[in-house]
Image: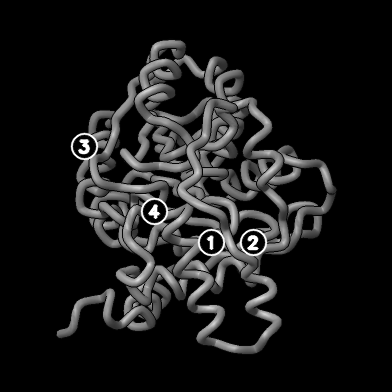
Amino acid sequence: MPPDNALPQSLITRLTSQARGEFVAHEGRRICWRGFGGGPPLVLLHGGHGSWLHWVRNIEALAAHHTVWVPDLPGYGDSDEPLHDGGLASLVAPTIATLNQLVGVDTPIDLVGFSFGGLVAAHLVAQRPQVRRLVLFGPGGHQSRRRPRGELRSWKAAAQSADPAALDDVMRHNLSMHMLHTAAEKIDPLAVQIHTDACLRTRFRSKEISQGGGLQEALLQRPGPSLLVWGEHDVTADPEVIASALAVSLPNGRAHVVKGAGHWVQFERADEVNALLLNECQASL
């Protein structure tokens, strides 16, 4: 069988067929959750300009040991837009409310967030303390130095051109500049398809929120263990600076840097991340 990265739609179709899709309503708006596997609940939150497929290379490995719940956050993918334009709170409140409908208000979970979803997760755990393990990959909201690799190009202009090759070229460029350490010409079709579809369906603007701080303040409200993970080449932060500094400021914080990876670390180094998550969550049982 050809590798999954040569057949992007085959992996997405396989995951979709395995999912237990749940549209859960809160205040008249629906959030799309997808459930996989069985065992202790593990919740994965995607990043800005993303969708549940930010975890495309992680779900099956994790679902072999956990009930994995993956939402499209409000304003993303298949979920409705937030009812109120209340910034971060307009995402956190319905995410907590619909999660509690799925697993129960008092049910402990393990919680993982990526990028902007890491900031969402930090605020979620501050309001829902029944979280055993919290793991954040390249979380937003730290307000420390960023180190851009290069300028991003307008995917909206490329999409409006109705030229698929032009859009593909822009997405590969932007993925290489911001998301992956891989060179643009070597980025596989799966990453391009996921990033393109997610961008086209994003209706919530997260950039200002993600760069506006609040991560440390939210995490300081959590007494339980928190693991903060960055790719070595993450452009949204300098791991050598932020990793240890943020971790030591927390009651039970630890930091880990994944060598050879960029911002979308769970995609670029999936096997290492899956092993890390399974080991971390096993420690919470």
Q: Residues within 10 Å of mark 4 (few under 14, many from 20)?
A: many
Asked if labels 4 and 3 touch by Cβ distance under 8 angstroms, the answer is no
Give the number of the mark in front: 1 or 4.
Answer: 1
Q: Position of residue 114 (x, y in %)?
A: 47, 45
Q: Position of residue 226 (x, y in %)?
A: 40, 25
Residue 117 to residue 135: above or below: below
Give the number of the mark in front: 3 or 4.
Answer: 3
For marks 1 and 2 on the same chain, the one whose residue lies earlier in the sequence? 1
Given residues 51 and 102, the one toward you in this image is: 51
Give the number of the mark in front: 3 or 2.
Answer: 2
> On the image, which quarter does residue 279 sit in?
top left
Asked if labels 2 and 1 touch by Cβ distance under 8 angstroms, the answer is yes
Q: Which amino acid, mark 4?
A: Val
Residue at image mark 2? 76
Q: Which amino acid, mark 1?
A: Ser
Residue at image mark 1? 51
Q: Position of residue 36 (x, y in %)?
A: 37, 61
